[in-house]
Image (cartoon, helix red, strand yellow):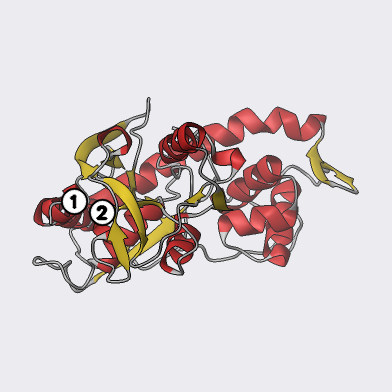
Amino acid sequence: MVPLDDAPVPGAEFRRSQAPRGVPANGVGSMDWDDVRVFLAVARHGSLRAAGRALGLSQPTIGRRLAAFEATFGGPTLFDRLPEGLRLNAAGERLVAAAEGVERAALMLERRRAASSPELSGTVRVSVGEWAASFLSRNLGAAATPLPEGITLELVESQQTANLARREADLAVRHHPPEGGDLYVAKLGEFACAVYRRAGSASDAWVTYTEEQAHYPTARWVLQRVREAGDPIALRASTATMHLAAIRAGAGRGIQPCFIGDDDKLLERLTAPIPEIAAEYWVIVHRDLRRAACVRAVIDWIRQLFHDQRDALAGIR
């Protein structure tokens, strides 16, 4: 799994609160885990602003927490302040390994604390890609078995899976299963894909991904068709949302998941589902959180949704 940002994200009572603290009055105080987190975030991201974005805290709060952490060690500066940002100096470098050990222990305790709660209330944060985000959000109110009323579902869309060990998310629904980590992984199903065009359009041009995304299976498939037939490319865009908008506007044809394309009255399907670009999806959760009541409820809901919608996902009309 690819590590991303370093912080648990605050939410409802299921998730960890993050109350700010200032520098002790005497300049030297006891160790505070929140200050250790801030030290690591600044070390990893290179600025107060970027660390604040990663932790969901303001830049002034990050600055106060970092000062508190430095004060714990008698006030030595742990970073060189450079025009391009903050860089660890020798004193700071010597603390990184120990701080990461504290981080691992604290996050393990936090995961196990969350897993021990029997309450079906709070926010459950799910790391998703574009297609999974669309599938889950459009079925949230239509599912035959709804989520418990006390649970708030939080979908966080990104190209890479959040770091579940650091609780950037509570679980993930992703196209690729992780290669390692203390994780529970189970296959959910597949998204069939086909070529769609605005109904009545005669355009043979293609809508596809940018050259930086040419390694995507769907992009490779389209490029092969372009090479074989010499058809033009009307649009290269970095998100499937932009693809769909362009296809609906009649700019050209392109690949969409069947659960989206078949449900859109403006579109017509030009091909059967294409097996070589079908997208497998997996649910991924850290083993410490697998049996948390809220997380378990969301996993069960997602698995039931994939089962109930299996014909639409397979492109069976």
The residue wearing badge 2 is 258
How far is disc 2 from disc 1 in space, using C-alphas?
Answer: 5 Å
Q: Which quadrant of the view contains residue 218?
A: top left
Residue that lies at the very extreme toward the right in this rendered image: 83
From the viewer's side, name the closer residue of 271 and 155.
271
Quadrant of the drawing holding the C terminus: bottom left
Q: Is residue 111 left or right of residue 119?
A: right
Whether residue 24 is visible: no
**Label pair 2/1, CB-CB below 8 angstroms:** yes
Q: Secondary structure at mark 2?
A: helix
- Across and down, in percent, residue 295 comes to 24, 53
**Is residue 225 depicted above or below 128 in this figure?**
above
The residue depicted at 50 percent of the width and 54 percent of the height is: 239
Q: Amino acid under label 1?
A: Gly
Where is residue 247? Give x, y as percent.
43, 62
Q: What residue is shown with label 1? A: 315
Residue pushed farthest top?
Answer: 180
| Residue in the image at 14% along x and 68% along y | 146
**Three-letter amino acid code at the position of disc 2:** Cys
Labels 2 and 1: the sequence-earlier one:
2
Mark 1: secondary structure: loop
Residue 182, position as x, y percentages in the image: 33, 30
Quadrant assignment, res 284: top left
Q: How many marks?
A: 2
Q: Is residue 127 left or right of residue 194?
A: right
Horizontal arrangement in the rendering, residue 178 relative to residue 106 (left or right): left
In the rendering, at what x and y percent does residue 282 appear?
Answer: 27, 40
Mark 1 surroundings: few (<14), some (14-19) or many (≥20) residues within 10 A = many
